[in-house]
Image (cartoon, rainbow, N blue to C red):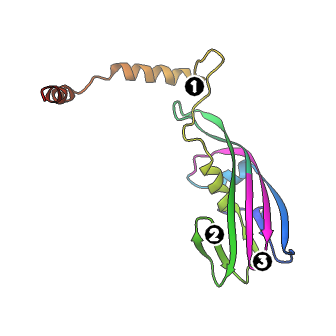
Amino acid sequence: MNHPDQYQIEFIGLNSGTHLFEFQIGDKFFEQVQDTEITGGQVRVKVTMVKEERMMDLHLEINGMVRVACDRCNEMIDADVNGNERLIIKLGDRYFEESEDVQVIPDTAHQFDLSPFLYEYIHLLLPIRRVHAEDKDGKSQCNPMVMKKLKELSEQHTQDPRWEALKQLKKNR
């Protein structure tokens, strides 16, 4: 990811204690990520950082919506992303990941880039199933042409005759 400094937390010079940061993530953020299913969105991230001498404990509150393809008709839909995450940053001798929630950065660092973590957290908050909502009559809002074609294809499906032979073997037990 190649994001400007807007997703950096500059911690050098901050006193120990609690510090608040807020980030607005828009379409440009997602456009810079290659091979992503998120095409855009508007997400607000509030970060509460508790700074200690050699560690920072970040609590992230993520709220917003992103645009993704519908699993059924492949048209774009808005999906809500809401959740809380935690990230611990420790100062050490080099960059490495101690665990999925703990990052170690060199003592010489003066800022920390949150952008890859923001993208990962947003992506993990996506709903498992992404389909258009139903209208007030319970009818899908998916593309009607695609729905028609899906129905045609499902009606044309004939079962493989080998399955029938296997079912007969099971019945004869």
Q: Which mark is residue 39?
A: none
* Tag 2 and tag 3, C-beta contact below 8 Å: no
* Tag 2 and tag 1, C-beta contact below 8 Å: no
Q: Which mark is residue 102?
A: 2
The 10 Å Cα crowd at callout 3, few under 14, some 14 to 19, many 20 or more, is: few
Q: Does residue 77 sit above or below 4 in this rendering? A: above
Q: Does residue 73 sit above or below 23 in this rendering? A: above
Secondary element under disc 1, as helix, strand or loop, is: loop
Mark 1: which amino acid? Cys
* Mark 2 or 1: the one toward you: 2
Can you say which quadrant of the picture contains the C terminus?
top left
* Mark 2 or 3: the one toward you: 2
Mark 3: which amino acid? His
Q: Is residue 72 left or right of residue 170?
A: right
Q: On the image, which quarter does residue 106 sit in?
A: bottom right
Write the residue at 52% across / 35% down.
Answer: 71
Mark 2: which amino acid? Val
Q: Disc 3 marks which residue?
A: 110
Q: Disc 1 marks which residue?
A: 142
Is residue 4 visible in the rendered structure shown here?
A: no
- Residue 123, position in %: x, y? 61, 50
- Residue 31, position in %: x, y? 66, 51
Residue 154 among magenta residues: no
Dominant SS type (magenta): strand
